[in-house]
Amino acid sequence: MNILITGICGFVGSTLAKAWLESQSGLTIYGMDNFIRAGSEENRKELLALGVRLFHGDIRVASDFETLPPVEWVIDAAANPSVLAGVDGRTSSRQLVEHNLLGTVNTLEYCKRVGAGFILLSTSRVYSIASLSSIAVEMSDSAFTLVLDQHVPYGLSAAGVSELFSSSPPISLYGSTKLTSELLALEYGETFGFPVWINRCGVLAGAGQFGRPDQGIFAFWINAWLRRRALTYLGFGGSGYQVRDVLHPRDLISLLRKQTAPGANASVRILNLGGGVVNSLSLAQLSDWCGQRFGEQEVRRNPETRRFDIPWLVMDAAQAKSVWGWEPQTALQSILEEIALHARQHPEWLEVSGMVS
């Protein structure tokens, strides 16, 4: 089977390529990357050594697809993954839309031309910020937890946010580009007769992630704590109690292999994929974990809550288990230990990730 992974030299794309080649024989992987993400060059040599054929191209440029060989499947892992993209001064709103939406259109046009199936790695941030912010939470063990005795929004339970949860705006410019990409992908698949799967991922984390405060937060926090860099709790009174679940991208491989298998079919096209409640933690709890391993340090507090901040978001992946028999395999502690080991072995990693001293 021939597969193209866009954004292959990013953390998620490179992790998928390496894990997939390890788990399946007879696989040929092509990769496309524009190398604009700080640190992405680090993965080039390792991927080439594994036999991956890399194409230096930009998904925003339609002509960059013209020299790509035909494949059977495309895994779209290329995106600006920050919820602050388009409003943080690092990228403009137009750049965000061109990357996350126009890039998807160009990729879908390629799939149409060569007859390839398409799998979009989407995001938990397609869900309504207003609805998520209205959820009643309480503090327990340095983390927000759901108040169970409340009228919860449709699609929410103690297990987390399901695919039925509201995606009404506001969801951020980033979230809206991903949600629109989902709809376009499904329409392209129906119109031009190729299979499409939408995998909405929660927070992805693991060793080798290029962490920053706005993306890759767990890798950033551990690396910054180890180097005694200044850290700040933002929002919610500066408590650090906001909670997210964590998933290692290699845990996606078992699902991707099923979705790309000949004749694979299911009526459900959109899935939530995340670590779930058991693999969730707050920044304050992560700080406790770091303090036990690297020594205590003070974390600054900024009480002002930004418009995209939410107190609690855990992905309910029950549908993925029901339809495909999928569930995460890597425990939270293993993910954190893996990041910590990598951080110790790579003292320059914050600079590699673009965090200049």
Image (cartoon, rainbow, N blue to C red):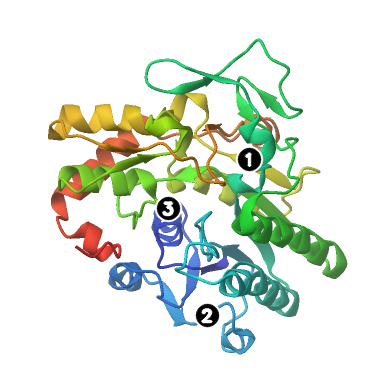
Q: Is residue 244 visible?
A: yes
Tell me the crowding category of disc 3: few under 14, some 14 to 19, or many 20 or more residues within 10 angstroms, Cα based: few
- Badge 2 vs badge 3, beta-carbon distance below 8 Å: no
Q: Is residue 138 above or below residue 286?
A: above
Q: Which residue is mark 2?
A: 58
Question: Of 131 and 72, which appears nearest the observer?
Answer: 131
Question: Picture coordinates of residue 348 (x, y %)?
Answer: 17, 60
Question: Gap between marks 2 and 3, in whole Å?
Answer: 23 Å
Q: Is residue 331 visible?
A: no
- Badge 1 vs badge 2, beta-carbon distance below 8 Å: no
Question: Gap between marks 1 and 3, in whole Å?
Answer: 21 Å
- Residue kind at label 3, given as amino acid type: Asp
Q: Which residue is mark 1?
A: 272
Secondary structure category for the residue under label 3:
loop
Q: Quadrant of residue 99?
A: bottom right
Question: Picture coordinates of residue 146 (x, y %)?
Answer: 57, 19
Numbered badge on residue 214: 3
Q: Is residue 68 above or below residue 251?
A: below
